[in-house]
């Protein structure tokens, strides 16, 4: 099976002759029935699909991929049975690993049906789009030999360049932003605000709007038109349109494309009636997994491809609004309650909810609500959390009026149910370990580690090879702190500790080294100084502080004169460290600089190994031109190409869920995975659902951030609201989006556990995990006390434990 070429016609003809000769239809139907009867009720509804649109709303652990694979194999078999056409099934999922997984499952089910393992293709959404675009390059305008897919680092550089160009072209609007509120014209404050706008506010606005707009097919011109409907003093959408326009010009001038360009290119192909019929005639249906993570353009692409070739006119209309009379052969499977990417990607669960509502109106909505992953107490806790959070949201938004499909609530109203007796899944709804749900309120984060360590030792004590466990954290910084605290305990008890974030940190070694070297080369550059300070803060070598104020006057910061105001201790510490870096630049030979910087950054063993590998490669490249300029050039190329692999001692795919291992992983990365035991420490209100706040350095613009206001305004227009919200309304909507997603993230985290979910909210914790030593009273995540009230038998009495 190839994701790059359609070679089905020949294979399908061979298959049809083989099927006629070897597999009598009654025998095939018996085998189809056997697979169908091995499925759960919700999965069976998918397997019973014949034609038309079908939405499947699935709960966590319901077996989406298993059901989809079986349904796909049955659909392929029925296609063989009733038709000699050369059409095939297209299966689309979110990631490459998921695509490989579902492809293997479909092949396995086809083997059960005694059918050749052909007749289908599995793609990621972008892989499908690129396939279509490259086959019709004259229509898509995508000449693959002439364009390059942009990397995140390159995109970041383009955004910074677009910001600088926009400032030059729009001095009046930029001055208005610079003035903000209560500006007295003082030079130091002007330089500080300038730094904030150039390096933070405008790049963040550009990054947010470019992704939101492109993934929805919105042009800069349309953004400007929407801006005329708003009244905010900064004309935020107009500013965003200008940044978007500059970015697009840079992309075109350098022959770069991004992932959204692939989707747009495929849609340009499908606007052509002849090309559209060619593509549609090769497909008898489209199955989509993880549908809650699709953007509007991606959905549009699938709906066009899933339409009967003769169902739409030849006039090039590519409208894709689903109606009860649609001829879409499209099955979409997802869980809007596991949509956890919408605050940093253009995905929005509202679109899959709308598809479910449309399908419900034509009796084409199925619910996979039985799940065998977790024990019953975990299911009860997850269901309670969902209902409690929705009720709290309704009380604030709708005066308590409950509407089953209300889009204002964080969750779709659906309940996880245990599987029925005789379910085919082995050990479905396993017996809980201990109480199954354990709720702790430690004194502080150090007490949290003590309690967690004790429970881990107990669970791994008898036979560690039989069970898997994970600690799910909200931030990588929490994971790093926990990893350091737990390492001695795990070593003592021979428990393998795997910190997933450690590899991500090692992958940032080249970028951190480059930031420090650029500062050493040009210490009077505000941008280079700020980048170096950010790296030092990230490594917790200097305290968090207003870096823009320091970077706006580099000389005064590094070498304050006798008339300068005394520096506070935090600034003095940062300045001393920066001066040490500059001294090393003068005193050390060039080839030793990278190793020295790695030691200065307090790298661990794996990071030091990665830095040594980096130094060796850079020194080899500059052997004939040993200079700081040559080193910076070589290092910049490595960072921008993103082709430097960190030193990795672990194997790949199943390393997160290996038995006998305690994995530290973020809640986001944990989606799609599961463990016997899941630990959820540090459940505090300041992180879940979090406080939507304005960074102090940008408060001169107002009590909001430009990027979040722009995102909310764009989504309001996309969702068909009658008016675009003003700044205050948009900021409130952005808050609601953030809170909803954080609660869905907690729900995803809870439903990763099979036999035990361990939850804690310490009385004292850091306000920010960049300063874990600064403990203060912290309120728990609001759902945590509610769980304690609902499940009193699961509350662990620490006083009793201490005896």
Image (cartoon, grey):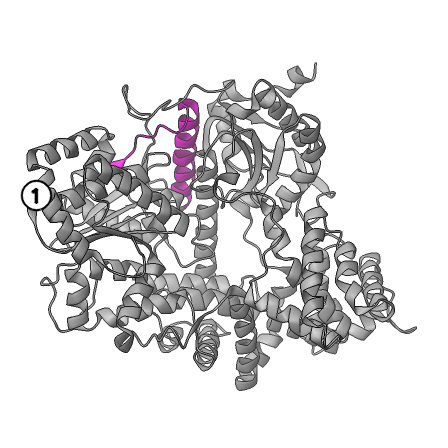
Query: In this rendering, does residue 480 appear at all?
Result: yes
What residue lies at 42% left-to-right and 54% top-to-bottom? 342
- Where is residue 716, by image quadrant? bottom left
- Direction from residue 325 to residue 101 in the image, left or right: right
Q: Name the chief secondary structure element in magenta.
A: helix
Work out whether 263 lies above or below 78: below
Q: Residue at x 15, y 72 (%)?
A: 274
Relative to the observer, which residue lies in front, 389 or 218?
218
- Count residues near mark 1 (Cα–Cα under 10 Å), then give few for <14, some for 14-19, many for 20+: few
Q: Is residue 418 magenta?
A: no
Q: Is residue 366 visible?
A: no
Q: In the figure, is residue 279 to the left or right of 108? A: left
Question: What percent of the width, then of the height, locates residue 265?
Answer: 31, 71
491 sits left or right of 660 in the view: right
Quadrant including the C terminus:
top right
In the image, 434 versus 764, the foreground residue is 434
Quarter of the image for residue 386 reads top left
Q: Which residue is mark 1?
A: 20
Element type where label 1 sits in the image: helix
At a point 15% along the width and 43% down the height, the residue shown is 77
- Report x, y in % for residue 583: 86, 67
Q: Position of residue 142 (x, y in %)?
A: 34, 74
Q: In the depicted view, which residue is nearer to us: 481 or 102? A: 102
Residue at (70% x, 36% y) in the render: 485
Q: Is residue 316 above or below residue 663?
A: below
Segment tinted magenta in the rendering? 367-396
Is residue 391 within the magenta segment?
yes
């Amino acid at each position: 099976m190839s994701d790059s070429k359609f070679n089905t016609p020949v294979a399908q003809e061979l298959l049809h002759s083989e099927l006629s000769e070897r597999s009598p239809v009654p025998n095939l139907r018996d085998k189809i029935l056997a697979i169908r009867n091995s499925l759960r009720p919700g999965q069976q509804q998918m397997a019973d699909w014949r034609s038309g649109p079908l939405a499947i709303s699935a709960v966590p652990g319901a077996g989406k991929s298993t059901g989809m694979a079986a349904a796909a194999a049955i659909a392929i078999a029925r296609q063989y049975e009733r038709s000699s056409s050369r059409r095939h099934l297209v299966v689309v999922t979110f990631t490459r690993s998921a695509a490989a997984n579902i492809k293997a499952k479909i092949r396995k089910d086809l083997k059960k049906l005694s059918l050749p393992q052909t007749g289908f293709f599995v793609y990621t959404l972008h892989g499908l789009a690129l396939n279509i675009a490259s086959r019709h390059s004259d229509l898509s305008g995508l000449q693959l030999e002439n364009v390059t897919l942009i990397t995140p680092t390159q995109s970041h550089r383009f955004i910074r360049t677009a910001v600088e160009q926009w400032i030059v072209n729009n001095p009046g609007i930029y001055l208005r932003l610079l003035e903000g509120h209560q500006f007295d014209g003082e030079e130091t404050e002007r330089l500080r605000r300038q730094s904030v706008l150039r390096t933070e506010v405008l790049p963040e606005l550009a990054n947010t709007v470019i992704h939101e707009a492109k993934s929805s097919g919105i042009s800069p011109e349309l953004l400007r038109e929407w801006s005329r409907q708003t009244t905010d003093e900064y004309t935020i959408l107009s500013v965003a349109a200008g940044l978007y326009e500059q970015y697009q010009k840079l992309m075109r001038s350098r022959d770069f494309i991004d992932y959204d360009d692939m989707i747009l290119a495929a849609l340009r192909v499908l606007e052509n009636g002849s090309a559209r019929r060619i593509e549609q005639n090769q497909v008898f249906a489209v199955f989509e997994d993880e549908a809650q993570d699709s953007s509007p353009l991606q959905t549009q692409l699938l709906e066009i491809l899933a339409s009967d070739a003769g169902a739409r006119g030849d006039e090039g209309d590519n409208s894709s609004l689903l109606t009860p009379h649609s001829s879409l052969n499209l099955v979409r499977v997802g869980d809007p309650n596991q949509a956890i990417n919408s605050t940093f990607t253009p995905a929005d669960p509202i679109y899959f909810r709308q598809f479910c509502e449309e399908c419900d109106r034509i009796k084409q909505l199925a619910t996979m609500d039985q799940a065998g992953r977790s024990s019953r107490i975990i299911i009860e806790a997850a269901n309670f959390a969902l209902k409690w959070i929705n009720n709290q949201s309704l009380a604030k938004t709708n005066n308590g009026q409950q509407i089953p499909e209300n889009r204002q609530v964080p969750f779709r109203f659906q309940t996880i149910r245990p599987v029925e007796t005789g379910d085919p899944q082995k050990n479905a709804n396993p017996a809980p370990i201990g109480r199954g749900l354990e709720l702790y309120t430690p004194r502080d984060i150090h007490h949290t580690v003590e309690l967690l360590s004790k429970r881990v030792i107990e669970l791994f004590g008898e036979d560690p090879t039989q069970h898997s466990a994970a600690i799910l954290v909200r931030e990588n910084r929490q994971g790093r702190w926990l990893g350091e605290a737990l390492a001695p305990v795990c070593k003592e008890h021979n428990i393998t500790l795997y910190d997933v974030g450690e590899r991500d940190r090692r992958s940032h070694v080249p970028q951190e080294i480059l930031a420090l070297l650029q500062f050493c080369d040009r210490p009077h550059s505000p941008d280079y100084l700020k980048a170096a300070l950010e790296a030092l803060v990230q490594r917790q070598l200097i305290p968090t502080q207003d870096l823009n104020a320091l970077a706006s006057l580099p000389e005064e910061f590094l070498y304050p004169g006798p008339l300068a105001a005394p520096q506070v201790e935090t600034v003095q510490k940062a300045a001393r460290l920066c001066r040490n870096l500059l001294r090393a630049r003068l005193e050390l030979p060039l080839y030793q600089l990278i190793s020295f910087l790695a030691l200065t950054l307090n790298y661990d063993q794996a990071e030091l190994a990665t830095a040594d590998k980096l130094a060796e490669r850079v020194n080899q490249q500059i052997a004939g031109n040993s200079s700081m300029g040559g080193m910076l050039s070589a290092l910049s190329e490595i960072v921008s190409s993103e082709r430097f692999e960190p030193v990795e001692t672990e194997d790949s795919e199943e390393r997160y869920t290996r038995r006998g291992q305690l994995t530290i992983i973020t809640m986001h990365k944990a989606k799609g995975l599961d463990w016997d035991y899941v630990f959820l420490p540090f459940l505090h209100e300041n992180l879940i659902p979090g406080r939507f706040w304005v960074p102090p350095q940008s408060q001169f613009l107002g009590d909001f951030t430009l990027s979040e206001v722009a995102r909310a305004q764009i989504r309001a227009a996309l969702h068909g609201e009658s008016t675009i919200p003003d700044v205050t309304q948009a900021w409130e909507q952005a808050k609601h989006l953030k809170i909803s997603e954080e609660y869905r993230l907690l729900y995803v985290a809870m439903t990763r556990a099979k036999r035990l979910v361990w939850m804690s909210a310490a009385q004292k914790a850091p306000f920010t995990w960049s300063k874990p030593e600064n403990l203060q009273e912290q309120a728990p995540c609001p759902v945590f006390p509610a769980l304690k009230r609902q499940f009193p038998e699961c509350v662990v009495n620490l006083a009793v434990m201490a005896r």
